[in-house]
Amino acid sequence: MAIQYINNFEFEGKKVICRFDFNVPLDKDGKITDPTRIDSSLETIRFILEKGASKLVLMSHLGRPKGAPEKKYSLEPVASYLADKLGQEVVLTESCLDRGIKTLMSLPETKIILLENLRFHKEEEANDHEFAKRLASYGDVYVNDAFGTAHRKHASTYGINAFFKGRALAGFLLQKEIVALDKIVNNPAKPFVAVVGGAKVADKIKIIEELLRSVDSLLIGGAMAYPFLKAKGIEVGKSLCGDDDVKLAKNILSKGVASKIKLPMDHIVAENPDAASNTTTGTSIDETMMGLDIGPATLDSYSSIVTNASTVLWNGPMGLFEKEAFNKGTFGLAKAIANSKAFSVVGGGDSVAAVNEAGLGEKMNHVSTGGGASLEYIENGGSLPGIQALKFGIN
């Protein structure tokens, strides 16, 4: 079965319950520091309202409350931001199961209702059937536009589909994610290049193994590179490098597909992240130093490879880009990808932050809103629990 998208659905007079990912960062005063995830939901919200829905019930989680209310994780800042953006009132409920919701649903002047944090209830993450049933009772139609949580079997993303046979739809954001990531999963245009950075090999072992089946080149940078270099007998000094990660790297390098892997040939190093930086003349790193970015020769080599690619997937920075001394590799590669003719997909929180900080987010073909979800989608060959439930329902 194909996923039903909202584009051609008749919403006139319908009560619509939508799952979004409003899990935005807040400062200590409870102010939103990056509204990207809320902004990316606005297209779907406005479309449903314009198509004449009688009620729009929004739901999301925020942060990691432990199954009970915590004021710092309230969706109140989200409600205020949405009201400002949409130019109309957004009523925040006291809880997802508030008895007053039934009254709100009957008031003609109340159009948009935001349920308080789903994860204030332990039943959400437990995918509790009765909890899903209560959520489902607020809508005639269910829309999932929360790609960032589509890899979770939670009540609001998975269990709720049981109550909307033929009336469970994907919103615009989910549609964009699926269309873009399917170009990576299903016969990507060649040459296909993946760029993988970040800290631990263990965290990305599955995605590395999956990508090595289909890529032409796998460019490894950041702290991810040091276990691979050490596994090849190259000195990495004080660089971040656990024994378990070295074992995993050694195992990957022992396989035939290892010839696709490209590793740094030089580095930007320092005694610590706050010390003065130097560039190595070769691949090895002195025992007093730690690698904190790829070097200029590596950047030139990697940039040349992505410039000639037809498809590029990027997950993970090339170094400690948050510090100016160690951002040249990450920002330089971002520029090369943005200027290439390749279909480019950026996934993962740090990579997204890096391309946005470099001012290149809009030059990428697709910047994923779900770091973990985008990786799992690729690892699983285009399958996630929330997306499968939209396609086939649940038993």
Image (spheres, rainbow, N blue to C red):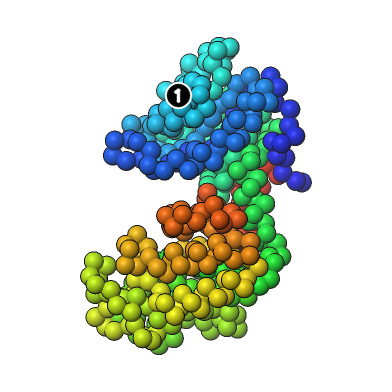
124 relative to 27 in the view: left or right: right
- x and y, in percent, of residue 67 in the image: 40, 37
Reply above or below: 385 against 240: above
- The image quadrant that residue 217 belongs to is bottom right
Q: Residue at x 60, y 83 (%)?
A: 256
- x and y, in percent, of residue 23 in the image: 45, 41
Res 2 seen here: yes
69 relative to 366 in the view: left or right: left
Res 68 seen here: no
Reply above or below: 283 against 120: below
What amino acid is labelled 1 in the image?
A: Leu
Q: Residue at x 24, y 72 (%)?
A: 276
Crowd around label 1: few <14 · some 14–19 · many ≥20 (10 Å): many
Q: Which residue is mark 1?
A: 92
- The image quadrant that residue 202 belongs to is bottom left
Q: Residue at x 48, y 73 (%)?
A: 220
306 relative to 12 in the view: left or right: left
- x and y, in percent, of residue 262 in the image: 52, 79
Secondary structure category for the residue under label 1:
strand
| 134, 222: nearer the viewer | 222
* Screen quadrant of the C terminus: top right
